[in-house]
Image (cartoon, rainbow, N blue to C red):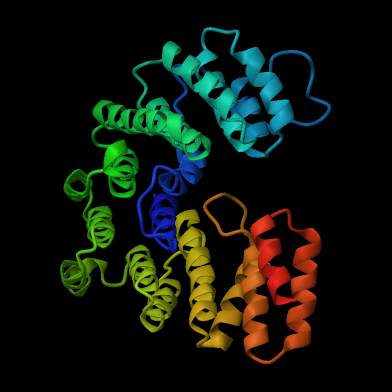
Amino acid sequence: MLALYQHRFSSLQLKEKKRTIKNITIMLTSVILLISMPSYGTAVSATAKTQKPTTESMTEQVLPLQQAINLYEQKEFIQAEKYFKQLAQLDDTRAMAYVYLARIALEKEDSDKAENFIEKALKVANKQADIYALSGIIYANIAQKASIFSALGYAKKSLQGFQKAVELSPKNIEYRQMLMGFYLGAPGIAGGDEELGMEQAQAINQLDQKQGYIAIGEALMAMGKKKALANHLANTPDNLQQDSEVLLGKGFIYQQQENYAKAINYFQQAIKHINDNNDPEQEKIKLQALYQLGRSSDLSKTQLSEGIAALSEYIQISPQGNQFAPVEWAKFRLANLMAKQGDQEKAKRLYQEIARNTQDENLKDKIEDLL
């Protein structure tokens, strides 16, 4: 839940305010790893659920489904793809296998294969809300890369996927968040509609007070209703005043508004009010707050020591996953802050280290401009 919410706020930080078919994907593609996939009635043994695959255990025989999923989660995509193709030959595991093959293809940025496998999954299991949600993500990803002539068609297919997911599972907040994100991020010609986006926010509010408060804030910000948004932020329900996820969300809003002093304050509060360091969701909030605190410090050229401390902690933990900012970007912002503090030599060494190791061309270009 949290990662979906954070990623949509991150998408709104784009300099380009105009909505396009291309930029809606920024809201949607990283949520692929967060969709919970049902077993479709497949019995996965207790042993398979706990056993981790080893080189010795990998034979030419079909692996149990959960072991194949373990391979996927360990990013062993070549082995995982091999076994999911075998599992796709079995009735009990065919739909799940196609889903994961689609996810692997998306990880590899192979849009054609992702489209092929998700369409096969929909043919096998056309009443599964999560498969429709995944199809929405995949079609949005394809729309981003497609020519102007086909992008619109894929964007509309993306919308249909999210709509069908909500229709099949109306109480699922994540699917409504995806649909809301599409309505608020897409141009009207592709199905974007601010009022329908707000309708989804209100529906989320009926299901969950906290997620509803967050969703309404997102909608108001996307719609540019500054006075209504200010009123919304000033009237946070008492029971949410110290909620770390809500505080993180406020930080994102003020960061988008370039009110960096308030943004940093709310990111600090979000970290302060983490109430269980052993809770994975709370840990995600903390990590995102750490990075965004450092980012706000970098963008505003203020509270440099606080920004350096936050980014240093983030880098030390080195979180993995699409819901987190890459560590190399955290190092880049840390180097920026070091330079702003006057430690040019230390910043230069860090820039050079990043440039040697990164595959991110955008990041390389930024570093080249600084060296």
Residue lying at 63% horizontally and 65% vertically, measured from the top left: 329
Position in image of residue 52 (x %, y %):
70, 34
Q: Nearer the viewer, residue 41 or 328?
A: 328
Instruction: Indicate the quadrant containing the C terminus: top left, top right, bottom left or bottom right.
Output: bottom right
What residue is shown at x 37% (from left), y 63% (from top)?
A: 245
Corner quadrant of residue 362: bottom right
Indicate the position of residue 153 as horizontal and vertical percent values.
38, 28
Task: Determine the residue positioned at 22% across, 67% down.
Answer: 239
Q: Is residue 151 above or below residue 41?
A: below
Q: Is residue 318 visible?
A: no
Q: Which is more toward the observer, 308 or 181?
A: 181
In the picture, measured across the screen, residue 268 lies left or right of residue 235, that is right
Left or right: 225, with 366 as reference point: left
| Residue 1 visible from this viewpoint | yes
Residue 230: name its quadrant.
bottom left
Image location of residue 176, percent across then percent down: 28, 41
Q: Residue at x 17, y 49 (%)?
A: 202
Q: Is residue 37 above or below residue 287?
A: above
Seen in the image, is 256 located left or right of residue 118?
left
| Label tally | 0
Q: Is residue 167 left or right of residue 76?
A: left
Give the residue furthest to the bottom: 342
User: Which residue is at the far right?
Assistant: 56
Report the front residue among 297 and 112. 112
